[in-house]
Amino acid sequence: MKRFTGAAMLLLIAGCATPQPVRDAASLDGPLPEMLVRLPPAEGSPEIMLLAGFGGTIDLSGDCVTVVMAHDGARQVPIFYTGTTIGRDSNGLYLRDRETADVFRSGDAFSGGGGFISQDILNEKRFYAASPGPACRNAAAGGVVSINPGMRHAP
């Protein structure tokens, strides 16, 4: 009985963990890497999401946000949904998921859902608030992946 109580307490504590705080650093200078974010759907339209499960590692070190996929090591340009944000605080660059509010830094492993899509999506002007710049177009030579809200830290 004591083992069960200890395990239950551990699960309770783990379930109450709060997301990593982000400290404001408005005074820190420098450009943020480009991050591709799709426009929200038209009012009354559903948000369409791909449903494959996958994981990888976040890379915020270049001029474009990229991910290195866990299954094959390929570097891909992610396209996030509106509400996922990139920023900088006193610990450096971060990406925050819109649904979980989890904060990811370069080198952090993640798991989530989404799917691989054609590089042709970069030419769809109706898809983005701003057309993808040269840094992301060049990085997309490795591929493009849509990442749904709900990313979590992976072990």
Image (tube, grey):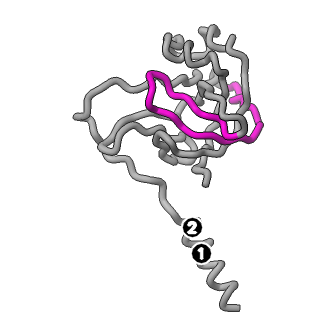
Name which residue lies at 58% across and 50% down: 153
Residue on which disc 1 sits? 10
Residue type of the residue flagged with mark 1: Leu
Residue on which disc 2 sits? 14
Name which residue lies at 62% across and 39% down: 149
Q: Classify residue 45 by image quadrant.
A: top right
Residue type of the residue flagged with mark 2: Ala
Q: Position of residue 23 (x, y in %)?
A: 32, 47
Q: Are marks 1 and 2 in contact (CB under 8 Å)?
A: yes
Q: Position of residue 134 (x, y in %)?
A: 50, 10
Q: Is residue 11 left or right of residue 129?
A: right
Residue sitting farthest toward the bottom: 1
Q: Is residue 58 left or right of residue 124?
A: left
Q: Secondary structure at mark 2?
A: helix
Q: Secondary structure at mark 1?
A: helix
Quarter in which the C terminus is drawn: bottom right
Q: Which residues are magenta?
A: 44-70
Q: Position of residue 49 (x, y in %)?
A: 72, 31
